[in-house]
Image (tube, rainbow, N blue to C red):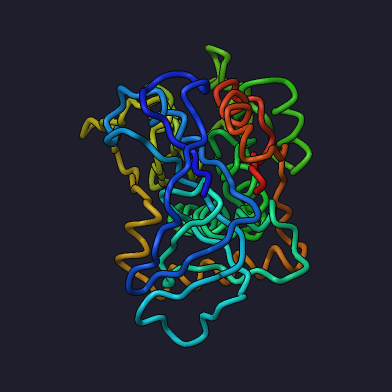
Amino acid sequence: MRAVRFHRHGGPDVLQLDEVAVPEPAAGQVLIQAEAIGANAIDTVLRRGGSPWDRELPGTLTGDVVGRIVELGPGTPPGVAVGQRVSALTVDAFAEYAVADTGFLASIPDDADAGEATMMSLAAPLALRLLESGRIPAGGTILIQSAAGTIGHLAVQLARSYAPKTIIGTASSAHRLDFIRGFGAEPVDLTAADWPDQVRAIAPDGVDTVLDAVGGTVFTQGLDLVKPLGTMVSYGAITTEVPTIPALGLQLRNVTGVSLYGWQQARPDEARADITEATRRWQSGELRPIVHATYPLADVARIHETLDARTNLGRLVATV
């Protein structure tokens, strides 16, 4: 089968299609024939190299695969069957076939859009869990960093169900700011040196909750915006600058981290419930996942060029 690999670190041009063997599903896994694959921004960091999370070469790309189950591994639980259409997060996603654990499959209706469906196994459940962890009070204020991205634009929409007074979203360009404004968020330009002051102008008393996957200085600035008894939620560091928190920076603030993998291991039943709830909201029309663009698998470099430029609105998808 064709699968994307990179044999050295660098720009999008290091991504290539290799011929590799079709993987065999192990115990508790299924083999999925891919229709669509959703890209994750963290893979641009891994592709470039030099991060705290580098893996051995040749490297693979993570992602969320939508397709049909074509083979069951040993010990497959009841309710999982060949022919079922699913979405699944996998570590070797950009390929014609992928293996995935059965524990956290999202069931996808036959008539559902494949690109949108890629957001049901990771992005939408994670957005929901971030908001739950953020302890948003009714009538409160939430700041969502990178609000135009795959997870951010879903979090902006899902945040409305918590009845906040104000949703603030940051982005890095005029068209991205317009995009999040269209979902009802107050837009703030994260590239502006005074972006924290822009947030304070909107929320003079501070914000109740911050969702951050940027890390570094942006994390520290965001923590300063959290009001007493508010909550900072960290779920990544796309800058590769892992946040550090001085004890004095806490000052009655709550700081928590969210990892979807960690949540699945610690609370598997609740993690599955998050997938079910996110999918329900999508199917009901309450949640509107946006696919920025779709490219053939062979054009995966174009996906990474867009991710590197930070110009996407919502998710980028490869088709097989």
For residue 275, above or below residue 162: below
For the residue pair 153 and 194, the one nearer the viewer reads as: 153
Say left or right for 157 vs 192: right
For residue 302, above or below residue 36: above
Picture coordinates of residue 309, whole percent (x, y): 59, 20
For residue 146, above or below residue 14: below
For the residue pair 42 and 210, the one nearer the viewer reads as: 42
Residue most extreme to the bottom: 78
For the residue pair 24 and 221, the one nearer the viewer reads as: 24
* Residue 198 appears in the picture as rendered: no
Say left or right for 80 vs 320: left
Residue most extreme to the top: 193
Seen at 59% across and 49% down, the residue is 37
Picture coordinates of residue 22, whole percent (x, y): 45, 56
Report the label total. Answer: 0
For the residue pair 279 and 320, the one nearer the viewer reads as: 320
Picture coordinates of residue 46, whole percent (x, y): 38, 31
| Residue 175 found in image quarter | top right
Seen at 41% across and 40% down, the residue is 60
